[in-house]
Amino acid sequence: MKGVGLESEQGVSWQVKFTGKAKKQKEKLPTAIAAALYLLRKELESEGPERINWPHFGKIKGKHDMYHCHLNRSRPCYVAVWKVTNRSVKLMEIRYVGTHENADYRRID
């Protein structure tokens, strides 16, 4: 029975939701960007919020438990911003999906 608690903890996945605004933004994305966002969401659900394998992944300075990454490498550049809303129940919320030039990180909460 050694390690049983660890195994069950690892098997619990994260729940990832979209804010109402991010849901609308997602519907307007080009097909390739929407596919990348789908992959990101699946990785967030299975692996958690720290996605260092995504381009330009980083913690947003001045914001608690908020992260972003680029969804493509070309122009226009699309980004996703997500926040851990509750670590104890493993809940995240995608707050912004769109072009890098339109992302105002100060206003995203």
Image: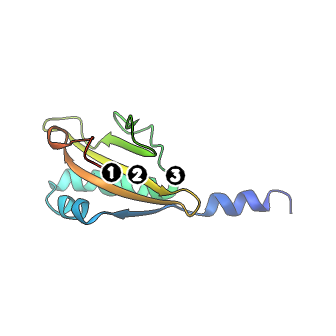
Q: Residue furthest right?
A: 1
Question: Looking at the picture, how far across and down is residue 102, in whole percent?
Answer: 15, 43
Q: Which residue is mark 2?
A: 83
Q: Are marks 3 and 1 in contact (CB under 8 Å)?
A: no
Packing grade of label 1 (10 A; few <14, some 14-19, many >=20) is: few
Q: Are marks 2 and 1 in contact (CB under 8 Å)?
A: yes
Residue drawn at point x = 25 percent, y = 46 percent: 107
Dot placed on the residue nearer the N-terminal end, 3 or 1 = 3
Q: Which residue is mark 3?
A: 47
The three-letter code of the residue at mark 2 reads Lys
For the residues labelled 3 and 2, the Cα–Cα distance comes to 15 Å
The three-letter code of the residue at mark 1 reads Asp
Tell whether 11 sits left or right of 59: right
Relative depth, front residue between 21 and 79:
21
- Compared with residue 95, is residue 72 higher up or lower down, i.e. above or below? above
Label 3: state its secondary structure.
Answer: helix
Q: Which residue is mark 1?
A: 109
For the residues labelled 2 and 1, the Cα–Cα distance comes to 8 Å
The residue mark sitting in front, 3 or 2, is 2
Tell whether 33 sits left or right of 58: left
Dot placed on the residue nearer the N-terminal end, 3 or 2 = 3
Tell whether 31 sits left or right of 89: left
